[in-house]
Amino acid sequence: MQYAERIRRLESEGAFAVLAKAKQMEREGKSIVHLQIGEPDFDTPRNITEAAYKALLEGHTHYAPSGGIPEVREVVAEEFRKTRKVDVSADNVIIFPGCKPVIFAAIMALVEDGDEVIVPNPGYPTYRSVTRFLGAKPVPVPLREEHDFRFSLDEFRSLITSKTRVIILNSPENPTGGVLTEEDLEGIYRVAVENDLWIITDEIYSRLVYDGEFKSILSVPGALERTVAVDGMSKTYAMTGWRLGYGVMPKEMADYLFTFAINNFSSTATFAQYAIVEALTGPQDEVNKMVEQFRKRRDVIVDGLNAIDGITCLKPQGAFYVFPNITGTGLKSKEFADLMLEQAGVACLSGTSFGQYGEDYVRFSYANSIENIEEALRRIKKTLAGIKV
Ligand SMILES: Cc1ncc(COP(=O)(O)O)c(C=O)c1O
């Protein structure tokens, strides 16, 4: 049977492939420490689960308006007014089943065949995969270790052509944990205006910043008219399985995505949307505790990796990933990741699964307990000592 050519343009994610292999090894009796997973190991805070349960019992089990329940959109607008200092209302907000569908729909609404989208590299694979799927061309902007995994404005400028339509930002970043500064964001906005570009800013790790404060490009005066900002419940509130995300954007764009939702999934689960209200307006103690735990784990893994011969690791400012440089081991990143899984029983991702500028690096997620992280560090050290010539 025949399939459309475009379906072959979609890529899978390294994390899912490694997870499948690691699970198979576990079934065969091997012990694996999972440092490949991009999701919090905590449970959803109970007050949030109870809010959704209550909504279910109250009968919120029917279709909702396709762009989200108006009251929930207003709560998200208020969150953005507070945290991004931007004047938005419910009309600027859409609620979708996760950040990923917002990213997909936003790229789809903005590119024509042959257009170019500048994507961070190493970066979240979905950006390049969806861009290609939609008939446009992803153009990688390198994030370099010597620049704290932020990109240089000159390099960004040099990649712009008459076909460039969009720049995608992700800060704090997956996989490097890099965070863009206020100065970076102001510069990026100026270049976007000069070249009439749209900005998609994936801010899913906005609450996971350990040093300094989170900054959004939406806070730059005027940015809203050309920006789609994406955030959601998955990482901050340990709610990956709930599938709840939202986008803040110009009203015209929100209206288009509303119509897209009508044609695609009708609405995000109605009772689940009430969990957003509780998450954003209820007590934040659980989130603060999780962030503190992540900070401790970050310090343990960074110090531990730097104590291993052949590895050097910057201390990332955000998200829950470290992206150590492994050139000193003499291994390429895929070889390193394979060796760790097969010999050390430590699952991690090759830097190249995030693009070509990820060569010489690997990604470890520290969304795991300190005991497991310490066990992984012991195994990595022992395995590398064994291959030393
Ligand atoms: C940068 C980034 N954006 C988006 C997502 C997906 O978010 P959601 O679960 O809300 O679809 C992830 C998950 O790993 C991510 O790392």
Image (cartoon, rainbow, N blue to C red):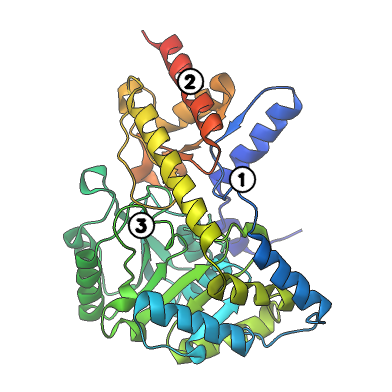
- Would residue 342 be seen by someone viewing this image from the given angle? yes
Q: Which residue is mark 1?
A: 16
In which quarter of the view is residue 229 placed? bottom left
Indicate whether 292 appears above or below 20: below
Q: Earlier in the sequence, mark 2 or mark 3?
A: 3
Distance of mark 1 from mark 3, alpha carbons? Answer: 21 Å
Distance of mark 2 from mark 3, alpha carbons? Answer: 32 Å
Which is more toward the observer, 46 or 162? 46
Amino acid residing under circle 2: Arg
Residue 38 horizontal/vertical position (percent): 54, 48
Indicate whether 19 appears above or below 136: above
Which is more toward the observer, 372 or 197? 372
Q: Earlier in the sequence, mark 1 or mark 3?
A: 1
Image quadrant for the C terminus?
top left
The reply to whether the residue tagged 2 has its Cβ within 8 angstroms of ligand 1 is no
In the picture, measured across the screen, residue 78 lies left or right of residue 144, that is right
Q: Which residue is mark 3?
A: 120
Distance of mark 2 from mark 1, alpha carbons? Answer: 25 Å
* Extreme residue toward the top, this view: 389
* Extreme residue toward the left, this view: 154
State the residue at coordinates (50%, 91%).
Answer: 91
Residue 232 horizontal/vertical position (percent): 53, 68
Disc 3, SS: strand
Amino acid residing under circle 3: Pro
Residue 13 horizontal/vertical position (percent): 56, 49
In which quarter of the view is residue 145 placed? top left
Q: Which residue is mark 2?
A: 378
Instruction: Tell me whether the residue at label 1 lies in contact with that at label 3, contact meaning CB atoms closer than 8 angstroms.
Output: no
Which is more toward the observer, 372 or 203? 372
